[in-house]
Amino acid sequence: MSAPAKDIQTTVDGEFAKPPLGKRLVGANTFWIALVLIALIAVFTAIAPAEFATLFTFQTLLIETSVLLVLSVGMTFVIITSGIDLSVGSVLIFAGMVAGKTMEALSGGDASHAGWGVITAGLVAAVLAGAVWGLINGFLIAVAGIPPLIVTLGTMGAALGVSLLLNGGSDVRSVPTELNKVLGYGTSFGGIPNLVLVAVVITLIGAWLLHTTRFGRYTFAVGSNAEAARRSGIGVTAHLLKVYLLTGFLAGIAGFMSLAYYASTTISAHTTDNLNAISATVMGGTSLFGGVGSMLGTVIGVFIPAVLNKGFNITHVQDFWQMIAVGAVLIAAVWFDQRRRRKRNSR
């Protein structure tokens, strides 16, 4: 059996763990990206303290990032395996559409006054819809051996097309009022929005799964060197299936959360969610080359474009500059990642 790659370390019991170098990279990534976020908050607070540094602004930021954060949790696992998923935005739309149509069907065409039994059925339908697309992606990538970029580019269009067919190209607008009131705009625990609580719980579970379990160790191992992982006894094919299934599952939950918040499937609002999730994950220090990443970094990465957009809106900066700033931060993150990787490989 050949020796594993230099950036994979085997523990005493034979299971894979993140390498010491990988841990140092994650720590450095998280530190610098956190400084960027703190600096942005400080700048906008200094420029517009009465508008930016308010409880309402930060509550709005948390709510607006909740759906994207759930998508980015799944994207973190995918990118750490050296993969990509361009379909999550379309899967989110599809899951929301399936949930909406399911609740309408169970309510005789108008789900506005539906109860929690119908709402629960809609949630199950959304999660299953997302998981199906995740399985399709995983099968085509892990079993059929088609590159992730091609597979998810194809399923991105397919999932969106099926979503449009389900309701004749229109949004589903008949959403239970109770769902919108409780999950979409409801609060608990001292005024914390319920939508935010759901995102926090999912993120904490994702962090636990990534950083403390065998599933997480295998994820890092596959991303570091898939062939070395396979020769060391890891079922790489099965693991990739699980990772893409998890990503589709989370996209289904995100679709249901969006449906609850907007009280509509809002198809046009999610066309760039896939790129936003990838950008947030990469800005948070997860390497596009695989094997390096952290859930804390992803959380910080999600908030950087959100803070930029909110700060620019408050200070009346044109939308064009918002896009330029987010693009510049993303390119800088990838550039720093490439520099670190070249320095590591030259040792």
Image (spheres, helix red, strand yellow):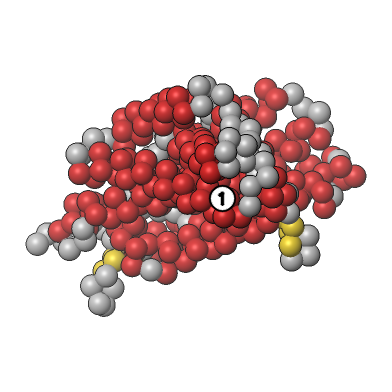
Vertical order, 208 against 179 (above or below): below
Vertical order, 202 against 336 (above or below): below
The quadrant in which residue 100 appears is top right
Q: Nearer the viewer, residue 163 or 7?
A: 163
Q: Is residue 77 visible?
A: yes
The quadrant in which residue 305 appears is top right
Residue 34 pos. (x, y %): 62, 53
Q: Nearer the viewer, residue 314 or 241?
A: 241
Q: Residues within 10 Å of mark 1 (few under 14, many from 20)?
A: many
Residue 31 pos. (x, y %): 57, 56
Q: Is residue 100 left or right of residue 88?
A: right
Q: Most extreme residue toward the front, as rendered? A: 108
Q: Most extreme residue toward the left, as rendered? A: 1
Vertical order, 86 against 119 (above or below): above
Q: Is residue 267 left or right of residue 192?
A: left
Looking at the picture, which amino acid does disc 1 mark?
Val
Q: Nearer the viewer, residue 322 or 87?
A: 87
Instruction: Name the residue tied to disc 1.
Output: 118
Residue 102 pos. (x, y %): 50, 41
Image quarter of the N terminus: bottom left
Residue 42 pos. (x, y %): 77, 48
The quadrant in which residue 52 appears is top right
